[in-house]
Image (cartoon, rainbow, N blue to C red):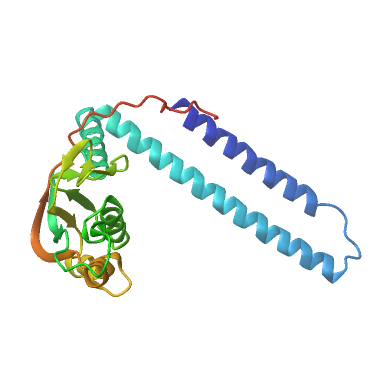
Amino acid sequence: MNVWKFNILILCILLGFLIVLQIKSVSGDYLYVPLKVIYDYKLSIESEKKEIENLHGVIEERSSFIENYDKLKSEGGLFKDALTQELENQKLISGFKNVEGPGIVLTVNDGTRELIGDENPNNVLVHDIDILNLINDLKAAGAEAISINGQRIISISEINCAGHTIRINNQVFAQPFIIKAIGDPKTLEASIYAPGQSGHYLKEIIGLLIEVKPVVNVKIAKYQEDINYRYLKVAEEGE
């Protein structure tokens, strides 16, 4: 609170200083003044006026912020409600809330086509890189929440091969891999089937079994694993 008042005081002092400086710069005895000098002074005055207007705007904005802060603080309950709402919003964004909305359900299975000559059988199996590419395409298409076999995908989620299975969030899963994504169903479906996308390549070229089903309401569970930060810490002011 005191910091904001101090900032407003400093802005007012600067404003007064600019006005005094301008008055001094245009005062004096001018008997013969070239037109260019007058024009330059005019531009300078207009610039200073605009700067003063900007300072007034900053002061009004800060005053309004302080007024709202004082109001919330005095009302107590509303201030607490605002903090609670902000906490819930952060949980929603970071993946620690159960969510639902329109989207798609994507099912990925190993391919069943016949091998060509001495082709490696691993070519028709689902690998972690395949799932990662599909997830990245969904994110690029605007997916707001994603899960794989019930595991919520957040910023620290890992997807690794473990033999014929895939480890997701420290849990091991075998095929089929069911990916749920919330977002615009048509856009998400296009991100899988459109030519040039990973889904189109895996389905049409590699031969994996890929099916996309648009859904009116997809339910995705929250992230439920424990998170232990060993190196992360809050940065000190000024760092």
Relative depth, front residue between 85 and 173: 173
Relative depth, front residue between 149 and 203: 203
Horizontal side of 28 relative to 9 (left or right) equals: right
Picture coordinates of residue 14 (x, y %)?
64, 40
Q: Is residue 97 visible?
A: no
Name of the residue lying farthest toward the right: 32
Q: What residue is rendered at 28% in x and 57% in y?
A: 130
Quadrant of the snapshot with the N terminus? top left
| The quadrant where residue 120 appears | bottom left
Q: Is residue 171 visible?
A: yes
Relative depth, front residue between 131 and 59: 131
Horizontal side of 218 relative to 118 (left or right) equals: left
Name of the residue lying farthest toward the bottom: 195
Picture coordinates of residue 201 (x, y %)?
28, 69
Is 230 above or below relative to 207?
A: above
Horizontal side of 129 relative to 49 (left or right) equals: left
Relative depth, front residue between 18 and 202: 202
Is 72 above or below relative to 16?
A: above
Picture coordinates of residue 113 (x, y %)?
16, 68
